[in-house]
Image: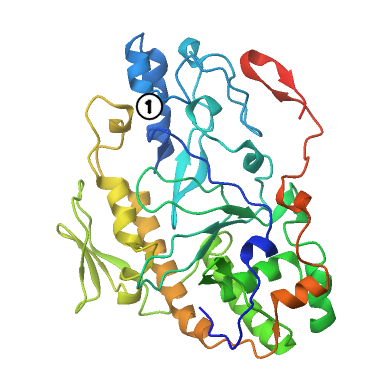
Amino acid sequence: MPSVTHDDAPLLADLMPWSVAPPRLGRRWPTAPDAASLKARWDTLVKAEEPDREALFEPTRSRTPHSAVAQLPGQSSGTGRLARESGPCPDPVRVLLAPFDEHWLIPDHRLIDSARPELWRVADGQQVFTVEQTVAPDSSGPVLLVSSVLPLNPPHGPRPGRVRPLYRRPGGQEPNLAPGLRDHLAGHLGHSPAPADVLAWILTAARPGADGIEVPLTADPEVWARGVERGRRTLWLMRRDGERPKLPGGRRPYVRAPLPARPLELLYDREEEALLTGEGRISPVPAEAWDFHVGGVRVLEAWFTRRTERAEPGTLEAVRPTSWPQPWTSELLELVTVLALLAELRPEHAGLTAETPITATELRKAHVLPVPDTARKPASVLDHHEEGPEGQFTLI
């Protein structure tokens, strides 16, 4: 996080005013690290007769197999009562289940307690979701993460804060930024920054504050350019779309001994810079990657645990691979790489200062703040019908 020489920094909640709580599933089985398990779980569910189907579903006050709900925006899942469902599994989609941990999800509104449809309506290839993180005492982890896929509220572990999409409409339209902010920045910087560059600066400068996450702004074009450059790299590493990140030759992690078919625990040898699981061995793994925490939780350990923890027999969650799939090893190697490269950026962020600040007071005098109430509400993005419960159509 940057050191700054002033107070009165604007809040993230004002700079990116529209926010939504992350979707909450209410049951764990609709997500998995592999898509094949989800299709097998669905088949098990729809082939079961009552009362077994209801028990497998794991009903809550919000959802049972008899709940009537609208179709999930942008998805083609059914809207009839799940108790009568006999069709194929909806195609799983990628979601961010936990920090740096993408899973697959059955995108069916009938399975999700609180889906946040307004987020699904703006989820597309140009969207970037910013997710506030729990700030743990004595933790150096980031206060913000970004993702190209929809973030969820994980069933266990630290719960994330609000989700702030970069755009309020599909297709990269209408940035979720305080109205007038980019024009005000242009008066200092000599150009109107692109929405993605504003987000890049936010990722570089964000820090915990007494009233929420603060984002010091600078009027210095040179400082702004340095911060945006670092933030762009952070964006690329966190989103992991496009070219795969690599560590320099000689520092790239490799599988030195194959991972066991059923690994039970993940250990770290600091002297050898190696991840160990049974007879399996991956090295070199920089200590900075192993020690990378978010919300007080070590990312690598949590990632491994979600793939190896025992599930209760007879539940849908217990339908899973019987041995460690090879793609998981590739994902683990990439995760080590991403965490190591992000850790390298921290000292650069710490050296960034805002000598000529743009304060919240200045933004208020320029009438950028406070933002209008409409900026905190979702945009009306629908120009078509969405299917409601039992096949009825509604226009929102």
User: Residue 328, relative to residue 383: is it above or below?
Assistant: below
Question: Is residue 295 found left or right of 93 in the rendered image?
Answer: left
User: Residue 112, relative to residue 157: is it above or below?
Assistant: above
Task: Name the foreground residue: 327 vs 369.
Answer: 369
Q: Tell me, yes or no, if residue 247 can be seen here.
A: no
Question: Circle 1 sits on which residue?
Answer: 41
Question: Is residue 233 found left or right of 197 in the rendered image?
Answer: left
Question: Is residue 220 found left or right of 139 in the rendered image?
Answer: right
Residue 72, position as x, y percentages in the image: 61, 30
Q: Tell me, yes or no, if residue 132 can be seen here.
A: yes
Residue 76, position as x, y percentages in the image: 62, 27
Amino acid, disc 1? Arg
Q: Circle 1 sits in a helix, a strand or a loop, which is it? A: helix
- The quadrant in which the C terminus is found is top right
Q: Colour scheme in the image?
A: rainbow
**Disc 1 crowd, CA 10 A, few/some/many (<14, 14-19, 20+):** many
Residue visible at 50% across and 84% down? Answer: 350
Residue visible at 36% across and 20% down? Answer: 44
Residue at the farthest left position:
279
Residue 189, position as x, y percentages in the image: 79, 82
The image quarter in which residue 73 lies: top right
Residue 19, position as x, y percentages in the image: 63, 51
Residue visible at 72% across and 46% down? Answer: 377
The image quarter in which residue 79 lies: top right
User: Residue 220, relative to residue 161: is it above or below?
Assistant: below
* Number of numbered markers: 1
User: Residue 381, relative to residue 227: is it above or below?
Assistant: above
